[in-house]
Image: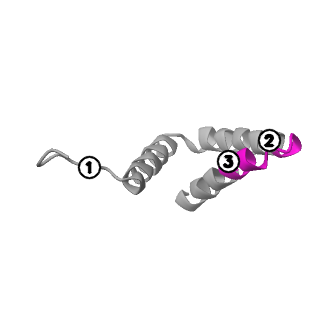
Amino acid sequence: IMEGAYNTTTADRRYFKVAETQAQYEKLSPTELGKKIKALEKKMYEHAHRLEFEEAAKIRDELQKIQSWI
């Protein structure tokens, strides 16, 4: 690493992604946010129906984060 260069760890990059995601949702109106949540729920159930549980779990986790912000 170059002296003075900023080294981001995996945890740092994850934090930045979460902050960016939160900022995107904060920009939405309550109506738009409701539509986004419904779309994510539909996508989650579709993944679960196709037995794609890891993908469904990722969306479930995202929905939980959104609900914790509102």
In terms of secondary structure, where does tag 3 sit? Answer: helix
How far apart are labels 3 and 1 at the CA level?
Answer: 29 Å
Label 1: few (<14), some (14–19) or many (≥20) C-alpha neighbours in 10 Å: few
The three-letter amino acid code for the residue at tag 2 is His
Q: CA distance from mark 1 to mark 2?
A: 36 Å
Front position in the image: 50 or 38: 50
Question: Which mark, by number, is residue 59?
Answer: 3
Residue bounds of the magenta highlight: 48-59
On the rendered structure, is 44 left or right of 70? right
Question: Does label 1 or label 2 sit earlier along the sequence?
Answer: 1
- On the rendered image, what quadrant is the C terminus found in? bottom right
In the rendered image, residue 32, in percent from the top left (x then y), is placed at 61, 38
First in sequence: mark 3 vs mark 1: 1
Mark number displayed over residue 57: none
Residue found at x 48% / y 46%:
26
Picture quarter containing residue 34? top right
Residue position for label 1:
7
